[in-house]
Structure formats: C-alpha cells, structure tokens
Image (cartoon, rainbow, N blue to C red):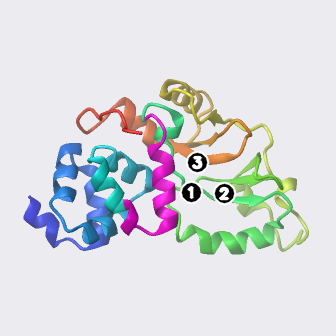
Amino acid sequence: GASLFRELNIEAAADTLPELEPEVQTALISDMEPEKASDIIEQMEPDEAADLLSDLPAATVKILLELIEKEDAEDIQELLSHEEDTAGGLMTSEFLSYPSQARVCEVMERFRADAEETENIYYIYVTDEQEKLIGVVSLRELILADPDKYPEKTLSGIMETNIKKVRVEDDESIVAAAISKYNLVAIPVVNEEDIILGIVTVDDIIDRILPPKAKRKKRKV
C-alpha cells in the first residue's frame, strides 16, 4: 500500500509508480511533500512523468515543475502540450542523435557515455546542420562499421536515408500502423521542419492499444 511505497528509495519509486493505476499514482504524489514528489518525477521517463502530471491540478503541476531540474521540466512541458492520443503525446524526448559528419569512432565513444543516461536505445538518429533528421543508424550497423579499419568513416556513410517517421500531430492509429507495417521497435517524431522531437516505442503503442491501467484522461494543455 501507500506506506510500503513511501519506504521505497527515489529510483525504485520512479520505476514502480508508472505500473500503478493512474488514480493511485495521483493519490500517492498528491500525498507527498512536493520536494520528494518532484525528485521521483524527475527520475521517471519524460513521457510517463507527463502522463502522471496531466492528471494533477494545474497549481500542483506548476509547483512540481518549478522544483524539477530545468531541462527535465522543459521536456515534460513539451510533452504536456500535445494531445495524449497523438504522436506528440505518446513520444518520449529521450533519444540519441548525432551530426551526419561525426566520425563513427567518435560517435561510438560518445555513445558509451550517452547510453548510461538514456533508456530504450534502439537506433541512433542523424541530423544535418539545421538539426533536421536526415538518417538513422541501427545499433547493429554502428557496431559493424569497423571504425578501427576505417577511422575516417562518418555517420553519413553508414546511415539509412529512407527514414520511417511520423509527424508530431499524427493520430496514434497512424503511429501504430507505421510501427507495425515496418516492423520497428521505435519511430522518430518530427515537426513540420523535419526536426526530431522524440521517439515512440513499440511498448508505448502496446500500452495505448492494450492499456494495463484504467482509461487515461485527455491531457490538460
């Protein structure tokens, strides 16, 4: 029960909270000191944090976001601005992207460090100078790129340019159809300028189509 949840450390609480019914999540967070609640929310995946906050009163959300690290708070606010049944509402802002001219050997070094901070890594996304999405590299392709043999090889030399992607305003049915049709584990979400904003994973889609929790409410923008 609630007393058991309060005994969990911050990391364990952040892992456990998204598995509970939405009304239980909101009750637990509402019953906590704002400082502890914000610490837990900060440790959660941004999309799961946004789902939780969307069910709380606006005044509570404001207090919690002010206590959360600025970058994390901005990620959550961005997700809260989208309807929950769209690609923007489903996506997480945690993904890895690198410039097309980055050498593969450099990317592999950066990847080792970045991967520790990012969950659910399936692909690396490649961007141009304007931050537009221009390619995608699977982890398998990155590993097989053999940077020792070809030290000057860049991401542009190994990336796939025929990118399967969805728009931020696309309905969840379009996202689900694309993931299913192309057998993807994740799909990038872009805006009208083709700048990548986030990714939707197959797990996110399954949770929406076969929700293990009570029916979720529409997000309050």
On screen, residue 179 versus residue 68, left or right, reads right
Q: How many marks?
A: 3
On screen, residue 156 versus residue 179, left or right, reads right
The answer to whether mark 1 and mark 3 are in CB contact below 8 A is no
- Residue 114: which quarter of the image? bottom right
View extreme (front): residue = 59
The residue to which callout 3 is attached is 198
- Picture coordinates of residue 172 (x, y %)? 49, 29
The residue at the point 49 percent across, 24 percent down is 173
The secondary structure making up most of the magenta span is: helix
On screen, residue 20 versus residue 102, left or right, reads left
Label 1 crowd bin: few (<14), some (14–19), many (20+), radius 10 Å: some
- Residue 213: which quarter of the image? top left
The residue at the point 69 percent across, 72 percent down is 110
Q: Please tell me whether mark 1 or mark 3 is closer to you in this view.
A: 3
Q: The residue tagged with tag 1: helix, strand or loop?
A: loop
The answer to whether mark 1 and mark 2 are in CB contact below 8 A is yes
Q: The residue tagged with tag 3: helix, strand or loop?
A: strand
The residues tagged by marks 1 and 3 sit, at their Cα atoms, a distance apart of 12 Å
The residue at the point 26 percent across, 59 percent down is 16
Give the mark, 3 or 2, whose residue is nearer the N terminus.
Answer: 2
Give the mark, 1 or 2, whose residue is nearer the N terminus.
Answer: 1
The residue at the point 15 percent across, 68 percent down is 6
The residue to which callout 2 is attached is 139
Which disc is residue 121 wearing?
A: 1
Give the mark, 1 or 3, whose residue is nearer the N terminus.
Answer: 1
Magenta-drawn segment: 65-83
